[in-house]
Image (cartoon, rainbow, N blue to C red):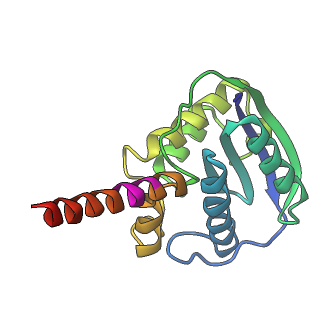
Amino acid sequence: MALMRLAYASEATFEAQPLEKGVEPHVARILMVSRRNNGRAGLVGGLYYGDNRFFQYLEGEEEFVRETFERIRQDSRHRNIRMLIEEPLDVPTFSNWSMKYVPLSSDVQAFLDKHQLPDFNPAAFSSHQCEEMIDLIRRSSEDQKLVNHDEDSPARVQHSQTLSPGVRYGLLAAGVMIIVAVVAGAVLF
């Protein structure tokens, strides 16, 4: 299994709407689908949306990263997509997040100020700035400066605690065997 990482920049084709729960509604829909799809594929990463532009970082198995990026390229909500990073990865660098979302924050504004950038335009980032942005997204969970409204929902909690089918069936079989052994032992004594 070959791991890879990928970062891209794109422009939104939609006109930004008023925020709902701190997230632009189109972006909220993207996050909902991304979290579901990325969780299934074992991908992790983060997304930032600002000034009608996206910066997204993905890492995981190469096949799934490439499939996901191809879906994004076909998504009518993105235009002027520019690959920023595409390279092999030795070990995962993100924790267990199917898709972090970093809202407008003082951290991103400080990043823009530090680099004297008038607005958020990741397509113009240098490789060093891309790495800084990835690190900012990665650190955001440690500082609790992210939005993940479905994090504590019952469906999200259930999903995060769900075992794989193989483990589930193995535990079920072991439980049945224990019950049979207890019953057989009771009959013999």
Q: Nearer the viewer, residue 172 or 32?
A: 172
Give the residue furthest to the top: 90
Q: Is residue 46 above or below residue 32?
A: above
Q: Quadrant of residue 124?
A: top right
Magenta segment's dominant SS is helix
Q: Nearer the viewer, residue 96 or 127?
A: 96
Q: Is residue 1 above or below residue 153?
A: above
Q: Residue at x 53, y 31 (%)?
A: 93
Q: Quadrant of residue 116?
A: top right
Q: Residue at x 14, y 64 (%)?
A: 186
Q: Quadrant of residue 154?
A: bottom left
Quarter of the rendering occupied by the N terminus = top right
101 to the left or right of 151: right
179 to the left or right of 41: left
Q: Is residue 142 visible?
A: yes
Figure disc tally: 0
Give the residue furthest to the left: 189
| Magenta segment | 170-174
Quarter of the rendering occupied by the C terminus = bottom left
Q: Residue at x 82, y 48 (%)?
A: 67
Q: Nearer the viewer, residue 99 or 189?
A: 189
Give the residue furthest to the front: 188
Q: Position of residue 24 (x, y in %)?
A: 63, 71
Q: Residue at x 47, y 49 (%)?
A: 106
Q: Position of residue 104 (x, y in %)?
A: 54, 57
Q: Position of residue 180 (x, y in %)?
A: 29, 62
183 to the left or right of 51: left
Q: Position of residue 149 (x, y in %)?
A: 47, 69
Please check the rendered image and state whether residue 187 is part of the magenta-colored stretch, yes or no.
no
Q: Is residue 118 visible?
A: no
Q: Is residue 69 above or below residue 132?
A: below
